[in-house]
Structures are given as structure tokens and as C-alpha cells.
């Protein structure tokens, strides 16, 4: 089952990078994060070390939290920017 998760993360990462990056550059970071997750799950399946426990688990949690904060910040900035543009367009009409 671990291999399925690894493959799923790789597919999501590549889709974000190659399909969605045209929309916004933030998808490069999001795609890279999912590629990292795919590598993490694959390494956990192949190595005898449990990469989800102990210090390795905390590293993954820290990377996940940092990526989440960065992507959420970019989302809210983009959302605010699009609302302001919509309001400007309404005022011009």
C-alpha cells in the first residue's frame, strides 16, 4: 500500500507542476512538495528505517507545516487581489 501512496504523490506533484503551473507559479512549490512526499513514502517503503517516527517524522511535519503556511498565504493574497480587481471593474461600469 505504501507504493500506491508514493505513486499517488508523484502523480499529483507532476500534475501540479506541468498542468497547473500555467495558472500560477505557486503550483511549482506545491508540486515540488508533493514530489517530496512521494519520495518520502517510497524511501519509507524501501528503507528499514521508519521515516514517520522520531526525528524524521518531525522533519516531515515541519516541512508540511512550512509548505501549508506558504501555500495558504499565497492563496489568500491571490484571493484578495482578485476581489479587489473585481471591485475595480464594478466601479468602472
Image (cartoon, grey):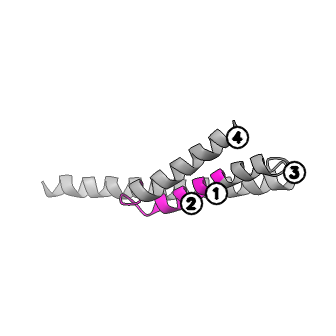
Looking at marks 4 and 2 on the same chain, the residue that comes earlier in the sequence is marked by: 4
Q: Which mark is residue 54?
A: 3
Mark 1 residue crowding within 10 angstroms, few (<14) / some (14–19) / many (20+) = some
In the orientation shown, which residue stands out farthest toward the left? Answer: 93
Distance Cα–Cα, label 2 vs label 3: 24 Å
| Dot 4 crowding, Cα within 10 Å, few <14, some 14–19, many 20+ | some
**Where 91 falls versus 53 (above or below)?**
below
Whole-angstrom CA distance, mark 4 to mark 2, is 19 Å
Q: Which mark is residue 2?
A: 4
Residue drawn at (20%, 56%), measured in percent from left and top?
Answer: 89
Residue for badge 2:
32
Q: Position of residue 81 (x, y in %)?
A: 36, 59
Element under label 2? Answer: helix
Q: What is the span of residues highlighted in magenta in the rendered image?
A: 20-38
Q: Secondary structure at mark 1?
A: helix
Question: Do the residues bearing badges 1 and 2 touch, measured as CB atoms within 8 Å?
Answer: yes
Amino acid at each position: 500500500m505504501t507504493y500506491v501512496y508514493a505513486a499517488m504523490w508523484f502523480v499529483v506533484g507532476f500534475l501540479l507542476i506541468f498542468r497547473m503551473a500555467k495558472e500560477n507559479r505557486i503550483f511549482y512549490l506545491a508540486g515540488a512538495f508533493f514530489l517530496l512526499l512521494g519520495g518520502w513514502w517510497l524511501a519509507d517503503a524501501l528503507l528499514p528505517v521508519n521515516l514517520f517516527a522520531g526525528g524524521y517524522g518531525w522533519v516531515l511535519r515541519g516541512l508540511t507545516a512550512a509548505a501549508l503556511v506558504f501555500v495558504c498565504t499565497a492563496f489568500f493574497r491571490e484571493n484578495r487581489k482578485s476581489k479587489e480587481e473585481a471591485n475595480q471593474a464594478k466601479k468602472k461600469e
